[in-house]
Image: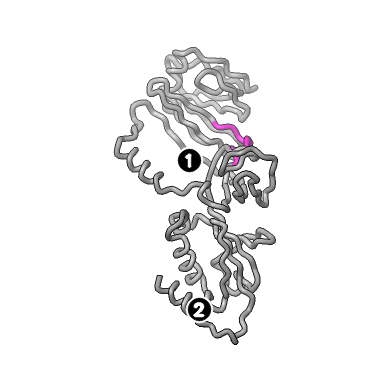
Amino acid sequence: MHMYDLIMKLQRNIPPQIERQQPVLFEDAHGRVAPFHIEFINCREAFEAVIEVRFRHVPGLRKFKAGEYVMQESHTNREINLAAPWDSVFLPGRKVNMSMVFKKTKIPHSICPGCHSDHDGHNDSGIECPNCGLWYQRIVELPTLAPRVTIRPGKRKRPSSSDHGNRQGANAVDDEIQQFKRVRVIEPEHAQGNTVDQECSDTDMGESYYIPQHARGQIGLILGEGNDEISTCNKAREAGGIKKGKATGRTRRPRAKKPELEPSDGGEEVGELSESEKEEFFNHVTIKPL
């Protein structure tokens, strides 16, 4: 606050006879345009101090402090790196836009992420919704290998009431897309339909687990403490509570009452399992990336 007051005082007291360069035009995530002169806001710390004060009583302060925003040059949409030398970041007369960053999944390209209205706009460089006026840009995030996930009945922690209350408290202060004028929406690649999520349902607990696939769209399923292994292809289809698709595998040790999955070097299709076989399957399943 002290730095902001000092900057504003200096700018107000500039004698009119002093010739200054063209100001930088800065548009924040709420669409507010504020010109400033690089003679006075001459470093990143001063610039961020001004932004923090401007967001003090409007949505976005938490996201700004968390670094969940992006700066772009207006005419080219080139992303600006605030860590670069200051003289190369803001040039006289340059217009800079600020957008808040949100991570969302499964939002169709024809749907505005703010008002959810349907329109025909599709432009990777940015779209302005004709209904609510929100400017948004979509970025597809490339997938990474998922960590190993183990599912065992009776050993999963159920959310307690205190955990639920903590999540509610965190969500209560979360900023929403509708509160801004400019946003960038980051979507994982599988949300665009390039990969297939696998679903694993535990019949005893009544819960579902979604394990994202990695770049090749495959995961490995290990049955019963590493006894059997099958690989599902990325064109899996649902059969009851599990996925059905091409499968190959090898038996490491025999195990009684295992599901009737027939490994084959040729990749035969796995048929639909009975309810008892599904229950046996999900009681002895470990999931890991291939």
Calculate the distance from the C-alpha at mark 1 to the C-alpha at mark 2: 55 Å
Coordinates of residue 89 in the picture (x, y in percent): 60, 69
The residue that label 1 is drawn on is 147
The magenta stretch spans which residues? 189-197
Circle 1 sits in a helix, a strand or a loop, which is it? loop
Q: Which of the 4 quarters of the picture holds residue 204?
A: top left
Coordinates of residue 94 in the picture (x, y in percent): 65, 68
Circle 2 sits in a helix, a strand or a loop, which is it? helix
For the residues labelled 1 and 2, say whether their Cβ atoms are less than 8 Å apart: no
Coordinates of residue 216 in the picture (x, y in percent): 61, 37
Instruction: Return the residue nearer the eye: 238 or 223.
Output: 238
Q: Residue at x 59, y 32 (%)?
A: 196
The residue that label 2 is drawn on is 12
Label 2 crowd (10 A; few <14 / some 14-19 / many >=20): few
In the picture, measured across the screen, residue 160 lies left or right of residue 117, that is left
The amino acid type found where label 2 is placed reads Arg
Of the residues under marks 1 and 2, which one precedes in the sequence?
Answer: 2
